[in-house]
Image (cartoon, grey):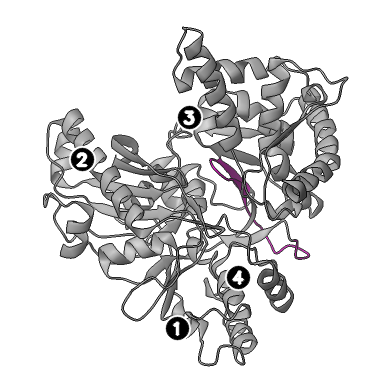
């Protein structure tokens, strides 16, 4: 039956370009909970000229590699060749700066979300727009280029995100899903398109320094979930699958950002729902019932893939430092003659963390490999700090790494709590949640809210993108929320962990120390 779905094209494919892996996920379009095949490709950003970047050659090498891995998985599992797909969608890391000239040539190296070089622009735009404009947003990068008088400005003819770029190369369409677009320029909640009042404001701000620059002419056209976004061209098919097996004509859904696919993967697209996505970065998305009372630098206002307003707490640093610690213990196990897989190392360490003290024994960990705007850091320095009387045990050391992963996130979520934002339940996804219950329990303590993890928690964004692609083939679904409720999550199984009072109190004590010790982090940045 699965082979028939593949050969008949009753499938949907999601491809997501994450920070460390490019993943592809093929699902049954009639039942998207059935994953038919997967593929992946490992890659890493580069720090060149003090800019975090990926080359476009690396983008295409990775996309082709992930697709080839997926196609090979189809043959292994189902004994058929992948030649067509019912619908396809691309998602990627949000925000950043990809500027092209009229011939489609990249004008500067891709500036990713991880860069924190746009402080003056973000501050000026936040004041002018009367809402928080984060450092990583595309409009902040563009305005910083104006402030710096960068020579490429007169040649710009288009701006997009990484997902929008890949989608455009495969389909020839210069479009973007509204969720991803909301990280380029503010969205008007009434029109679910770029805010025209702020478009005029921006054009006025750059009129003298960059005459002729009109941001509306540069931005991709905005589409909502469920709207058609073009089809795979012959050139696109050859670019994705150089073997020539993949046929053109496959319909595409709007390209989206990884925040939007995380919301879809956890069915957190309705008001009073939210999700936490943990990977290289970690962020929380909470769908709002109404506007916030004030602007906050800790909170970004973005949208769901359907265009509904969302409060986003985005932290540049997530699970990478925890992974580095796990790698060190894996090396020790191998040298001790008892080699363990990565999953086994994580299982042992996370289970041990459950035995730690509620406040992690007085230890402090900072996971800041790069700058962290929420706490005012332009650069990061991973630190592990303890006092002479702290309880330095393996359980506490790993527990404090998990607490540290959620530390900055908790500071942002505290702002939403103070605003009176109500969350019925948070959903979590990402690899760290594969070890059942542990990271989930500590996240519940950090935000003092029940946290649910579903069967698709480790599938994450690529699966969420495949679900958005599958929606194209279900015209009976009136809204994205309706489609998810009826076609995807109707029989979904989730496990919900309520915050334990002792964990909540312990994390609160940890967070007090964490905030105080930020002075140590800032001193390290200044000194090293």
- Label 4 crowd bin: few (<14), some (14–19), many (20+), radius 10 Å: many
Circle 3/circle 2 CB separation < 8 Å: no
The answer to whether the residue labelled 1 contacts the one labelled 3, judged by CB atoms less than 8 Å apart, is no
Q: Residue at x 23, y 54 (%)?
A: 240
The residue shown at (71%, 75%) is: 124
Q: Is residue 463 above or below residue 197?
A: above
Task: Give the residue displayed 50% in from the left and 27% down from the top.
Answer: 434
Contact, mark 2 vs mark 4 (Cβ under 8 Å): no
Callout 1 secondary element: helix
Nearest to N terminus: mark 3 or mark 2: 2
In this picture, residue 418 sits left or right of residue 480: right
The residue pinned by badge 3 equals 493
Give SS at disc 2: helix
- Disc 4 vs disc 1: which is toward the camera? 4
- Mark 3 is surrounded, within 10 Å at the Cα level, by few (under 14), some (14 to 19) or many (20 or more) other residues, namely few
Q: Secondary structure at mark 3?
A: loop
Q: Is residue 341 left or right of residue 448?
A: left
| Residue range (magenta) | 273-296
- Give the Cα distance between marks 3 and 4: 41 Å
Q: CA distance from mark 2 to mark 4?
A: 39 Å
Q: Which mark sits nearer the N-terminus, 2 or 4?
A: 2
Q: Which residue is mark 1?
A: 217
Which sits earlier in the primary sequence, circle 1 or circle 2?
2
Instruction: Name the residue that disc number 4 marks.
Output: 140
Q: Position of residue 316 (x, y in %)?
A: 61, 49
Height in image: 101 above or below 372? Answer: below
Residue 208: x %, y % from top left: 62, 92
Seen in the image, is 51 located left or right of residue 78?
A: right
Residue 419, percent across and down? 79, 55
Q: Identify the disc placed on residue 103.
A: none
Q: From mark 3 to mark 2, how far is it between C-alphas?
A: 29 Å
């Amino acid at each position: 039956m699965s082979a028939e779905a593949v050969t008949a094209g009753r499938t949907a494919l999601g491809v997501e370009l994450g920070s460390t892996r490019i993943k592809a996920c093929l699902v049954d379009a009639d039942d998207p909970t059935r994953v038919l095949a997967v593929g992946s490709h490992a890659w890493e950003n580069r720090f060149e000229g003090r800019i975090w970047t990926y080359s476009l050659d690396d983008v295409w090498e990775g996309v082709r590699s992930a697709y080839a891995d997926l196609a090979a998985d189809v043959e292994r599992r189902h004994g058929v060749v992948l030649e067509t797909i019912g619908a396809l969608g691309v998602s990627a890391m949000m925000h950043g700066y990809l500027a092209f000239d009229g011939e489609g040539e990249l004008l500067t190296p891709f500036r990713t979300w991880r860069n924190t070089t746009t402080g003056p622009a973000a501050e000026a735009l936040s004041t002018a727009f009367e809402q928080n404009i984060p450092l990583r947003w595309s409009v902040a990068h563009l305005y910083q280029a104006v402030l710096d008088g960068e020579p490429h400005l007169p040649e710009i003819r288009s701006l997009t995100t990484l997902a929008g770029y890949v989608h455009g190369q495969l389909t020839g369409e210069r479009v973007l899903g509204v969720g991803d677009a909301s990280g380029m320029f503010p969205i008007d909640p009434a029109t679910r398109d770029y805010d025209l009042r702020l478009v005029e404001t921006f054009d006025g701000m750059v009129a003298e320094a960059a005459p002729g620059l009109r941001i509306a002419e540069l931005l991709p056209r905005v589409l909502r979930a469920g709207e058609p976004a073009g089809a795979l061209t012959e050139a696109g098919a050859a670019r994705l699958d150089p073997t020539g097996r993949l046929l053109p004509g496959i319909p595409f859904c709007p390209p989206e950002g990884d925040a939007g696919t995380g919301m879809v993967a956890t069915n957190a697209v309705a008001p009073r729902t939210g999700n936490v996505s943990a990977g290289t970065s970690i962020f929380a998305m909470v769908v709002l019932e109404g506007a916030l009372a004030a602007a906050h630098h800790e909170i970004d206002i973005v949208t769901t893939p359907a265009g509904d307003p969302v409060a986003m707490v985005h932290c540049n640093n997530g699970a990478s430092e925890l992974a580095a610690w796990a790698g060190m213990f894996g090396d020790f196990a191998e040298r001790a003659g008892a080699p363990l897989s990565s999953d086994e190392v994580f299982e042992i360490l996370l289970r041990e963390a459950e035995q730690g003290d509620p406040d992690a024994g007085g230890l402090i960990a900072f996971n800041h490999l790069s700058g962290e705007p929420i706490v005012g850091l332009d650069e990061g320095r991973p630190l592990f700090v303890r006092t002479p009387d702290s309880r330095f045990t393996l359980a506490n050391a790993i527990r404090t790494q998990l607490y540290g992963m959620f530390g900055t996130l908790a500071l942002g979520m505290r702002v939403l709590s103070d605003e009176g934002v109500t969350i019925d339940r948070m959903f979590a996804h990402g690899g760290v949640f594969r070890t059942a219950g542990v990271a989930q329990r500590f996240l519940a303590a950090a935000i003092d809210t029940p946290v649910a993890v579903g069967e698709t928690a480790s599938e994450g964004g690529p699966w969420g993108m495949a679900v958005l692609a599958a929606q194209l083939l279900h015209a009976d679904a009136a809204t994205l929320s309706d489609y998810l409720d009826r076609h995807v999550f109707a029989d979904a199984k989730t496990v919900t962990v309520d915050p334990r009072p002792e964990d909540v109190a312990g994390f609160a004590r940890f967070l007090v120390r964490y905030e105080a010790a930020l002075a140590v982090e800032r001193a390290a940045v200044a000194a090293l």
